[in-house]
Amino acid sequence: MPTAAKLAASVLFALVALFGAQAVKMLFPPGTQFGYFVWISMAIGVLVGWRVMGPRVGKGLSTAAGSGIATSFVLVFWCIFFFAGNEMVQRSIAGRYEGPFDAVIKGFGIAADYAVLLVHPAILAIVLIGGMASGMVVELVSRRWR
């Protein structure tokens, strides 16, 4: 059921994804082509905000802050999963793997490489502070508009 809290969570976690994606782009060499990276990250943020953070409101600000951080890490997980899977498929189409099992194993390696890349202070700050602040704002929205 749509609520104001779910809508606010969708918008706020799309913003967390936007700022996180822009920070990730800064870690790559100039001229790197990202395509729809930011837009897809924001779409994942909308879905995660609606499905994960939206239903977790109404338990207080400290719980909302923790739920916001957890939602941010769910957002990071799904972004890594999506983009590593996409990279695996692109490499598979190019014929770089010997079979499907090899592709899946290498896909986990790609995901691990992406995860290591995200352990950067700026990105961690965006994920932690953005998630905490978003969770608290969603809690306040749920109190104001029931």
Image (cartoon, rainbow, N blue to C red):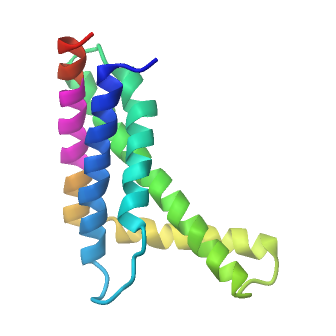
Q: 63 or 93: which is nearer to us? A: 93
Question: Please, which residue is most extreme toward the right here?
Answer: 99
Residue 52, x across and y down, in percent: 43, 32
Spot occupied by residue 89 in the image (x, y as percentages of width and height)? 66, 73
Numbered label tally: 0
Q: From the viewer's perspective, is residue 81 above or below residue 45?
A: below
Q: Is residue 112 covered in magenta?
A: no
Q: Residue at x 42, y 68 (%)?
A: 36
Where in the figure is residue 18, as x and y percent of width and height?
A: 28, 57
Front-lying residue, 9 or 100:
9
Query: Considering depth in this image, is 10 or 104 the residue closer to the camera?
Result: 10
Q: Is residue 59 above or below residue 41?
A: above
Q: Which residue is drawn at 23% across and 58% down?
A: 19
Queried whether the magenta region covers residue 134, the answer comes back as yes
* Rendering quarter of residue 10: top left
Residue at 72%, 74% (x, y): give it.
103
- Looking at this view, name the residue that lies furthest to the top: 146
Q: Give the percent coordinates (x, y) of residue 1.
A: 46, 17
Q: In the rendered structure, which segment of residues is drawn in magenta? A: 128-138
**Residue at x 35% of width, y 27% of height:** 6
Main SS category, magenta section: helix
Question: Is 12 left, or right, of 54 in this rendering?
Answer: left
Q: In this view, does 63 lie to the left or right of 82?
A: left
Q: In which quarter of the image is the C terminus?
A: top left
